[in-house]
Image (cartoon, rainbow, N blue to C red):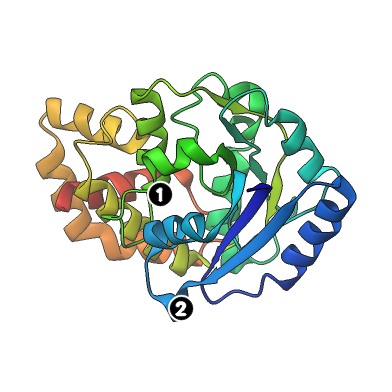
Amino acid sequence: MGDLSILIPVYRYDCTQLVADLHTQGDALGIDYEVIVADDEKLGLGRARVRNWLADQSRGRKLLFIDCDAAVDSPHFLENYWKASTLAPVVCGGQHNVDVLPSPDVSLRFYYEEAAKHQRLAAERNRHPYERFTSFSFLIDRATFMDIRFNEQFTEYGHEDTLFGAELERRGIPVLHIDNPLLNTDIETNGVFLEKSRTALRSLKKMERELEGYSTLLKSYRKARRMGLTGLLAWLYKRCGRRWERRLIRSGRPSLFLFKLYKLAYYCTL
């Protein structure tokens, strides 16, 4: 068995540079490592199953999952993870995003991430370690992963990592967040981001009971339901949803409040 398996699920994305950078750092670290890339366009497994498949192909006692749209911008990325690997069975390095708006076409995702920048810091993530778990980049003991695995009921985008974090807490498995971010290079256009957001909400609805207490939107939905507002919100979405979408897509500085309202109202229709 090797020391480290770096596992990268890919779907219609060129991760050549990411793999090259990881090989450079792995060689310098002097450990027994491997990099395995799974092209899910060919495998057709879905977001959860492809990650489980990658783990099954691996031989490392530590598994490092990385999303394909990440970029390494620290020369000590693998070293930082390896140093932290003895501190907890699960270590999350975090992510950061571009500092300057690349185009008005991606303004919604850009400003959404800008607003969440403070929450990306390890000190903040460690305040709610399980709720802040993300599969974008995380290191995990092989035995721990094999015992939990990603829930393969998730076939569409969204919340497979939320449920994984919830399962870690239910089993009492420590999670450590460190400041070792990768750069998120794939900022979707406003229309695509809205579409992915709706898909994620459908995934949330599918696993609503299991994700209770782990989703901010689900907490807002519960509050709206207690206040008897879900019917009104669903009506608002059906009446105003298209207009809201146009505003969110076309604006160079879209309203994040409107985006929150849009998601909550859409969820009330499900």
Q: Please provide percent x and percent y for residue 269.
A: 15, 52
Q: Please provide percent x and percent y for residue 240.
A: 25, 58
The numbered dot on residue 15 is none
Q: Please provide percent x and percent y for residue 111.
A: 59, 49
Q: Is residue 26 above or below residue 146?
A: below
**Which residue is found at the position 61% from the left and 63% from the top?**
68
Mark 2 to mark 1: distance in Å?
A: 30 Å
Ranked by sequence position, the earlier of labels 2 and 1 is 2
Amino acid at dot 2:
Glu
Q: Please provide percent x and percent y for residue 250.
A: 49, 67
Residue position for label 1: 259
Q: Circle 1 sits in a helix, a strand or a loop, which is it?
A: helix
Q: Check disc 2: other Cα within 10 Å, few if <14, some if 14-19, many if 20+.
A: few
Residue 213 as seen in the image, left or right of residue 47:
left
Residue 50 as seen in the image, left or right of residue 5:
left
Amino acid at dot 1:
Phe
Residue position for label 2: 41
Q: Is residue 143 above or below residue 101?
A: above
**Which residue is found at the position 86% from the left and 47% from the top?**
30
Q: Is residue 34 above or below residue 39?
A: above
Q: Nearer the viewer, residue 259 or 214?
A: 214
Q: Circle 2 sits in a helix, a strand or a loop, which is it?
A: helix
Q: Is residue 104 visible to us here? A: yes
